[in-house]
Image (spheres, grey):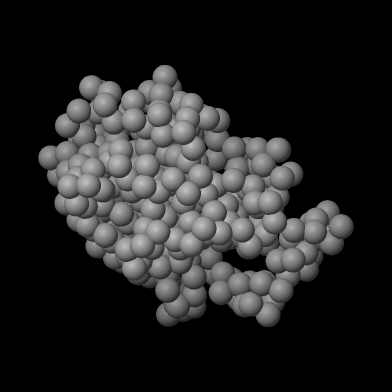
Amino acid sequence: MRFVHCSDVHITADYFAQSFFRLGWRRWLAFAELTVGGRARAYRRAPETLAAIAREAREHQADHFILSGDLTAYALGSEFEGARAALGELVEDRSRCTVIPGNHDVYTPGSHRSRRFERYFGHLLESDLPEHCREDGFPFVRLVGREAAVVGLKSARVPFVPGISNGLVGPAQLEGLAALVQDPRLAGRAVLVVVHHAPLTHRGREDRWIHGLKDAQALCRLLPGPRHAVLHGHIHHRYHHPATPERPHIFGAGSSTLAGDEGYWVIDVSEGQVVGGQKHVPRLSGGGL
């Protein structure tokens, strides 16, 4: 079986065409990042790049497509619309596609209260085993064929202030995940757990407290060995830490649409085990960004 994993695509609206008042103070602070920091330029062709990755998922004959959060730059409705449009028909079928929110998708309290992510992608959060859901429909599970299961977790929380972007799965979801991995209906299946925040950085360490996953160790303890993998984003580095007897495979998808570092994973599963992954660079018209 084959899975395509991308992350942090950051579809970005034209912020200079927005009502400054309606953007709110959190997005006001983002103007420096968009302009001087170069984010708007770096993600100018993100919709085209995401569409190319979705198209290539079909070319790879992937059984399932996974996007591990940060679909948007700052959680505007138009950004969510752009992400959904770029994914095309793939996003209409939850048997083929898993998408979870990242911290940029709950960037403001208003985006969280109005359930803006769910307005565009809520149909993908329905679980094949809903009795294991614990918090806002998480963890949800998708049974893929006979050899794999994809589990979605929510680690993204509304930050107290921009710049603090750590994540938390929380005890309720961890309890649900523990029940899931022991469920006999998952016996013999590889379990691919999708979470936005990274259990380990590309250097094999836990991330710093203002950016990392607070309960990373607790998550990894539930998923030992090559039957399990954690697929994440948040850290804009693309890497793979192979499984050990104590922890799962860890695949960081980087920022799949970042100009000059576009890319995604193709991850293979065989006989209920995650057997490896290959990095791919999407083919873009005009020779890249």
Instruction: Give the residue drawn at x 42%, y 19%.
Output: 131
Among the 4 quarters of the image, the one containing residue 110: top right
**As drawn, which residue projects farthest toward the top?**
131
Relative to 89, 76 lies left or right: right
Relative to 127, 107 lies left or right: right
Residue 285 visible in the displayed image: yes
The location of residue 280, given as percent across then percent down, is 31, 66
Q: Quadrant of the N terminus?
A: top left
The location of residue 267, given as percent across then percent down, is 26, 53
Instruction: Give the residue drawn at x 23%, y 43%.
Output: 224
**Residue 93 in the image: above or below residue 163:** above
Q: Give the total number of marks visible in the rendering.
A: 0
**As drawn, which residue projects farthest toward the left?**
271
Instruction: Give the residue drawn at x 64%, y 47%.
Output: 158
The location of residue 256, given as percent across then percent down, is 44, 64
Instruction: Give the residue drawn at x 69%, y 76%.
Output: 35
> Which of the pair 98/284 is nearer the observer?
98
> Which of the pair 251/205 is nearer the observer?
205
The location of residue 85, given as percent across then percent down, is 55, 51
Residue 86 visible in the displayed image: no
Relative to 150, 187 lies left or right: left
**As drawn, which residue projects farthest toward the right?**
21
Among the 4 quarters of the image, the one containing residue 287: bottom left
> Which of the pair 263/160 is nearer the observer?
160
Relative to 65, 190 lies left or right: left
